Image: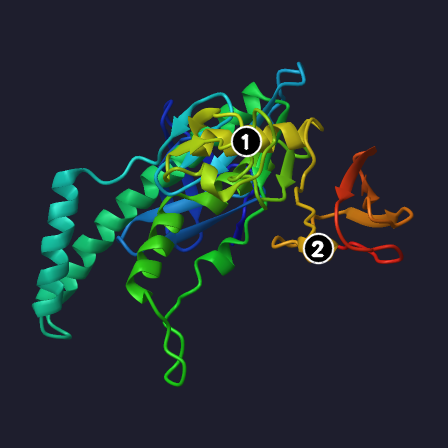
Amino acid sequence: MVAVKPGDVRRLSRKVGEVRIPKVGWVRFRWSRPVEQAKSFRVSRDVAGRWHVAFAVIPAPISGPGTGAAVGVDRGVTASAALSTGELLNVPPLWETEKKRLLRLQRRLARAKRGSKRRSKAKTAIAKLKAREGDRRKDWVEKTSTDLARRFDVIAVEDLKISNMTRSAKGTLEAPGTNVRQKAGLNQGILANGWGQLVIRTGHKAPGRVQMIDPRYTSQTCNACGHIARESRESQALFLCVACQHQDNADINAAKNHRDTAAGLRGGCAGRLAVGRAGEPRTSTRPPPCGVVAVGILCSSGRGGCQLQVELFKVGVGFVVISLLTVMEGELCGETLRT
């Protein structure tokens, strides 16, 4: 890290500038963005052998349209980002010729002798291809985050623990994991789509306008009727509601749920109440919804059955749902139904 002094940075043309580096002298660099207010800079070299100079400048946040427009973003592996507007965005991958060359280089690296010049050349060539892939991903993240910050005032993104999701499944010697290669492929797909970078850069450009949404059941909830069912996911890409037959792309349907949750049109969590046979209360097969309290109040019992009044209080949203369930058999008075 080197402090910038007056006269240490000068511009030669529209795309070329010079910086004075201690003990080196004047070094030219590609002028890609304004650096007049930089306080310091750092010179680094990546694994592909490229030299970079990074100036410490805090850019101004990007202002939104001011119309209150909200968008939901659902991140995936097949589609890098699905927007509630119906757009499917993808990180540009390596070309087919580049993939074939990468495979040949990896095979050459496996055959090369350790410490040899041929192995060093193969490693450098692989690093250049990997750096090119990373540059395209970073460029896509910057352009996409800028576009989201300019077009929308509220950006809803699911709150995913990416470090936990990309954890290896190989296990230990005592307890080896299962489907290790499949999990490794999924991890590579998640990291290659820049899930974390997209949210971080969007938060930098639109501070205070990015809302993290609880991801539970968002991929199983119908955006049209609100019905929750795992069976509605016909496939990875198709969502077909088993209740209202609403059909949509699965990722876009989840993105719409994120948007509605951020806009206050839908609760952030969802759950079910269940009553067993013969009036026996049982626990729901799903975990209790976030911020929801269920209280059971039973009426007088008799052969005709009894009514169970259940009140659901949604904390933080400000609405109360009261439903009446009729138990035809059994005497449940004095019991409490829990979810």
User: Residue shown at 22%/48% (left/top)?
Assistant: 129
Number of dots carrying numbers? 2
User: Residue shown at 52%/34% (left/top)?
Assistant: 254
Q: Is residue 58 visible?
A: no
Q: Is residue 277 above or below residue 260?
A: below
Looking at the image, which residue sits at the far right? 300
Q: Position of residue 242 (x, y in %)?
A: 49, 33
Left or right: where 22 falls relative to 69: left
Q: Are marks 2 and 1 in contact (CB under 8 Å)?
A: no
Q: Position of residue 230 (x, y in %)?
A: 49, 43
Q: Which mark is residue 236?
A: none
Q: Secondary structure at mark 2?
A: helix
Q: Position of residue 314 (x, y in %)?
A: 79, 40
Looking at the image, which residue sits at the far front? 303
Three-letter code, disc 1: Cys
| Label 1 Cα neighbours within 10 Å, binned few <14 / some 14-19 / many ≥20 | many
Q: Secondary structure at mark 1?
A: loop
Q: Is residue 334 visible?
A: yes
Measured in 3D between alpha carbons, the distance from the residue under mark 2 to the one under mark 1, in whole angstroms, is: 31 Å
Circle 2 residue: 278
Left or right: where 274 falls relative to 97: right
Three-letter code, disc 2: Ala
Q: Nearer the viewer, residue 288 or 268?
A: 288
Circle 1 residue: 222
